[in-house]
Structure formats: structure tokens, C-alpha cells
Image (cartoon, grey):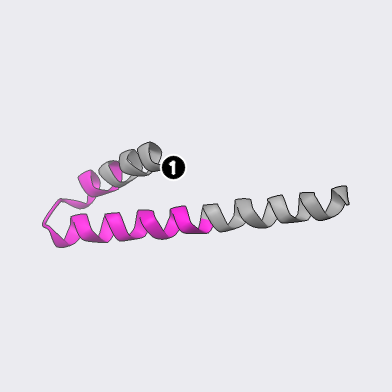
Amino acid sequence: MISINKKMSNSIADAIEDAGAMIHGEIYQSLLSAGVPQTYATNIAWAIDTFLL
């Protein structure tokens, strides 16, 4: 039973990581589309990610 729970927790962690990467990409692209320079967009996206996740 423990191995099933560990396997499930790994799957959940992977899904959260994937969702975080997707959210980061969306925020980053939105900032770029709004005309924010790439350097700032990268830092702002990471800051927002840190706050949300």
C-alpha cells in the first residue's frame, strides 16, 4: 500500500510541476505580447510563479 501512495504522490508532484511550467509559459508570453522586454518578462513571470505556487 505504501508504494501505491508513493507512486501517486510522485504523479501528483509531476502534474503540479507541469501545471506550473504551463502557467509560467502563459504568463511569460502574455507579458511579451504586452510589450514587456524579455529580461523583465522573465523575472516578472518567475516572481508571479513563486507567489502563486
Location of mark 1 (residue): 53
Assess whether residue 30 is covered by the magenta stretch: yes
Say which quadrant the C terminus sits in: top left
Residue 40: x percent and y percent?
A: 21, 44
Assess whether residue 25 is covered by the magenta stretch: yes
Q: Is residue 40 above or below residue 24?
A: above
Residue beneath the point at 14% across and 51% down: 36
In the rendered image, the residue lying farthest to the right is 1
Q: Is residue 12 left or right of residue 26?
A: right
Q: Is residue 43 above or below residue 13?
A: above
Residue 47: x percent and y percent?
A: 32, 38
Q: Is residue 5 left or right of residue 24?
A: right
Q: Is residue 25 left or right of residue 15?
A: left
Compare residues 3 and 20 and report the one nearer the observer: 3
Residue 41: x percent and y percent?
A: 23, 49
Residue beneath the point at 69% across and 52% down: 10
**Amino acid type indicated by mark 1:** Leu
Q: Which residues are magenta?
A: 18-43
In the rendered image, the residue lying farthest to the left is 35
In the rendered image, the residue lying farthest to the front is 1
Q: Main secondary structure of the magenta part?
A: helix
SS at mark 1 in the image: loop
Q: Quadrant of residue 27?
A: bottom left
